[in-house]
Image (tube, coloured by chain):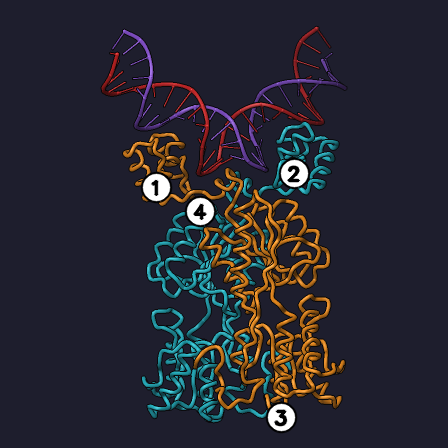
Chain colours: A cyan, B orange, C red, D purple
Amino acid sequence: MIKGGQVTIKDMARILGVAPSTVSRALQGHPDISAETRRLVNELAVRLKYQPNVVAQGLKFRRSNTIGVIIPEIVHYFFSQVISGIEEVAYKAGYTVIFCQSNERYDREVNNVKTLIAHRVDGILVSVSKETRDFQHLADILENQIPLVFFDRAAPGITADMVVTNDREAACMATLHLAGQGKKRIAHFAAPQNLFIGMERKAGYLDGLVLAGLTPDPALCVEADSFEKACHEISRMKASGTFPDAIFGANDLTAIGAMKSLLREGFRIPEEVAVTGFSDSRFAEIAEPSLTSVDQHGFEMGTLATQTLLKRIESADREYPCDTIIVKADLIIRNSSVCSKGVEPGAGHQAC
Amino acid sequence: MIKGGQVTIKDMARILGVAPSTVSRALQGHPDISAETRRLVNELAVRLKYQPNVVAQGLKFRRSNTIGVIIPEIVHYFFSQVISGIEEVAYKAGYTVIFCQSNERYDREVNNVKTLIAHRVDGILVSVSKETRDFQHLADILENQIPLVFFDRAAPGITADMVVTNDREAACMATLHLAGQGKKRIAHFAAPQNLFIGMERKAGYLDGLVLAGLTPDPALCVEADSFEKACHEISRMKASGTFPDAIFGANDLTAIGAMKSLLREGFRIPEEVAVTGFSDSRFAEIAEPSLTSVDQHGFEMGTLATQTLLKRIESADREYPCDTIIVKADLIIRNSSVCSKGVEPGAGHQAC
DNA sequence: ATATGTATTGCAAACGATTGCGGTGTCGAT
DNA sequence: ATCGACACCGCAATCGTTTGCAATACATAT
């Protein structure tokens, strides 16, 4: 009987009275092994439910068939979509994924990198945390010759493949859409400006205003990137007297917070104030009225990032220039921004 | 210079002209090694950014400090919360997590188990897929002496630790709450009845009706567990003439689909029809009106499941009886079920 | 009988880290 | 000079798997 735990090649060799190398070759169908021995080995293997120890194989071949993922927070619809895309591609290619969550914290991100290097993963996918200012740990990945691909949030100054959205363009589109509805006083509830996406979306917003022939009003562009902050901002704006006729939120939760407050204050959406969000979470369809928003295609971003990584892993010898893939975001127009009679409440992406 | 890839103890030994064993001991602060040598080794280690190869360590010690997770679909707020809880506890305990998604498919679940066993993970967390009828692959985990803990969805007939919700009680509570609002014709939009949670929630619903002194009406209990199906069901019920004055949805998306349709049909919520959901996703707060729902405490379920698993891993020698931990769900009352003037729109869990 | 070929299998080293045990060198004590 | 004590370090085996090379056995050809 086997001592405990998993069956090894050595166990099977002992049982059959042959050498471990014979068992190994038999399992691989090596022609040197006689048909009889092969049969014996294979039968025993299924009977004992032998599973090769990939840890040992990894040591031998200096590759683990494992990729690491560092993600800021998984409890975001967008990121969970990305992970799903990553897992899908990895699974089909025979890779397993080690999952780390930075919780938007720098120290954890540094530790996550260490862990993944210690595990000798074949490649790493990273979306940089909000807190990260120093990128040495990410440079270390490349110094260790480990392929690296950024998704959604890249690190400035680090040359690596990346898969990102055209945030700026998309933000511009959203702003132009609001202007196209005849809105003149378009506000922006922005994400923190130390974040790349925060800057990009604000820049796109300003682009849009200019293109629409509107003059930006600093009082209408405030930093507020959460449900609660948006609520607070609406109250403040109402008190201050300078009120917008449209709001472009840096993310969906912000936009929805704004809508909730607007409704409570008695405003009609979109007639009096139109609203759009960003990053098409399922929230957008569900909000009442349903929210016009930008679909970032998270799942696709995950699959593309992983394909890019695997490509680089599997051509580890050849060097080739880094790639930047832009996953174009789409503006999904719903009821929070257009007062068309044709659009039913609850309609949007999905028929109802 | 190092050949390529990561630095090893051998590399450092060669550079310093000592034996690998000396380097190993120096790094561990072994007293046999002179202070001078220790200093030399440690300095070189930081200079070269040495990271111990945990794959090799895993082989040596027959433990990988790695746990595996099999989850049906990560793009669910509940499951992403669970994962977050799992990662949190694992990270703090120095374990890394290998993440697999079954996509609710049996064959993938079987493969996921194989992968995790091949990786010699120290323990496995599983939430069984909807499709799974045969549980042999899960039994195999235990046969391989790998600790196993189920969360949310357990496999019948397999003796293992599990962390689950008190679905039935919670469903009963939700139903009683609706009855408490004076509702008499309470409908249930149920999950598939081959699912354990589907059965439990329906049973709880019936318990609630009985406790409230209401007689169940089969016409009011239908299978509908998605946004779209709920919309469809509302139309059908209206056409058929038998209309409820309250709806208990098997999950939040279903309840919200129902609400959207009700509003479109001109019903007032909760005055004419009250609604409750299940599994407190962020959707519940966001819906308009905000949705009364059952909070399943996903994050806590993740942390508890992982703690249970680690406990079993770290006492692998001693056998002790399996545990079933029930994470009690809470009914969070919001505006979709009570017409209190005191509750502001948008209020709920979080202040606004 | 000797040489050559072929089929089948085992030996041993390697991947990176760890550890029991043995070896070397230096010191003071006798 | 001899011995023991002690500090310090290296050898070699181990974890599970793979693979180049050597070894064995047998058959065939010369």
Label 3 CA crowd tier, 10 Å (few <14, some 14–19, many 20+): few
Q: Which mark is residue B45?
A: 1
Q: Residues within 10 Å of mark 1 (few under 14, many from 20)?
A: some
Disc 4 or disc 2, which is closer to the eye? 4
| Mark-to-mark CA distance, 1 and 4 | 14 Å
Vertical placement of residue B25 versus A298, above or below? above
* Residue found 66% across the figure and 61% down from its top: B129
Count of residue discs: 4
User: Is residue B32 visible from the viewing direction of this image?
Assistant: yes
Disc number lying in front (3 or 2): 3
* Residue pointed to by mark 4: A118
Residues at marks 3 and 2 touching, judged by CB atoms closer than 8 Å: no
Q: What residue type is disc 2 on?
A: Gln
Residue drawn at the location 48% of the way across and 88% of the way down = B342
Left/right placement of residue B204 relative to residue B90 reads: right
Q: Position of residue B301 (x, y in %)?
A: 55, 63
In the rendered image, which residue does mark 2 sit on?
A28
Q: Secondary structure at mark 2?
A: helix
Q: Earlier in the sequence, mark 1 or mark 3?
A: 1
Q: Quadrant of the N terminus of chain A?
A: top right
Image quadrant in which you'd find residue B35: top left
Name the foreground residue: A241 vs B303.
B303
Residue in the foreground of this view, choosing between A72 and A278: A72
- Judged from the image, the secondary structure of the residue bearing numbered disc 4 is helix
Q: Which residue is pictured at 40% across the width and 91% down the height? A: A184
